[in-house]
Image: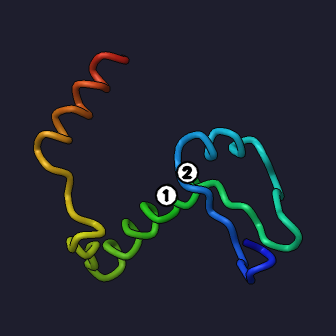
Amino acid sequence: MVAAGCDVIVPAGVLPGLLISGERGLCIDKAPIVNWVAVALLQAQLQISLFQLNDLSPNRGAFCARAGTQAIADFRGLLARHQ
């Protein structure tokens, strides 16, 4: 990927995130490898800041659509079992 011109690498998925979660300054050549959990957290913080600054909300198109009622119920059930 770096040889093809990639400037930054953001591995997707839980396993890669867990494997690099404790790493600091991880790079391949000069391309930093960013933990996706950090990216998701900062994205959420940015959305909150934009809303507070000028009432901008995320686009609710296909990319940022709200989860369906079944997915929400499943997630809440999973959380309840592990508390």
- State left or right for residue 69 relative to residue 63: left
Q: Image point 64% across, 54% down: which residue?
A: 35
Q: How many marks?
A: 2
Please tell me whether mark 1 sits on a helix, a strand or a loop: helix
Q: CA distance from mark 2 to mark 1?
A: 5 Å
Q: Image point 16% across, 34% down: which residue?
A: 73
Front in this rendered view, residue 7 or 1: 1
**Residue 22 % position (x, y):** 75, 41
Please identify the quarter of the rendering in which residue 80 is found: top left
- Extreme-right residue of the structure: 29
Please tell me whether mark 2 sits on a helix, a strand or a loop: helix
**Residue 27 % position (x, y):** 83, 63
Q: Residues within 10 Å of mark 1 (few under 14, many from 20)?
A: few
Asked if 82 appears above or below 69 in the picture, the reply is: above
**Residue 75 % position (x, y):** 26, 34
Q: Say what amino acid the circle numbered 2 marks.
A: Val
Q: Quadrant of the N terminus?
A: bottom right
In this picture the colour scheme is: rainbow
User: Do callouts 2 and 1 mark residues in contact (Cβ within 8 Å)?
Assistant: yes
Q: Image point 68% across, 66% down: which residue?
A: 9
Q: Quadrant of the C terminus?
A: top left
- State left or right for residue 69 relative to residue 76: left
Q: Residues within 10 Å of mark 2 (few under 14, many from 20)?
A: some
Q: Say what amino acid the circle numbered 1 marks.
A: Ala
Residue at the spot of label 2: 37
Q: Image point 79% across, 72% down: which residue?
A: 31
Please identify the quarter of the rendering in which residue 53 is found: bottom left
Specify the label residue 18 is tagged with.
none
Residue at the spot of label 1: 40
- State left or right for residue 37 relative to residue 60: right
Front in this rendered view, residue 48 or 29: 29
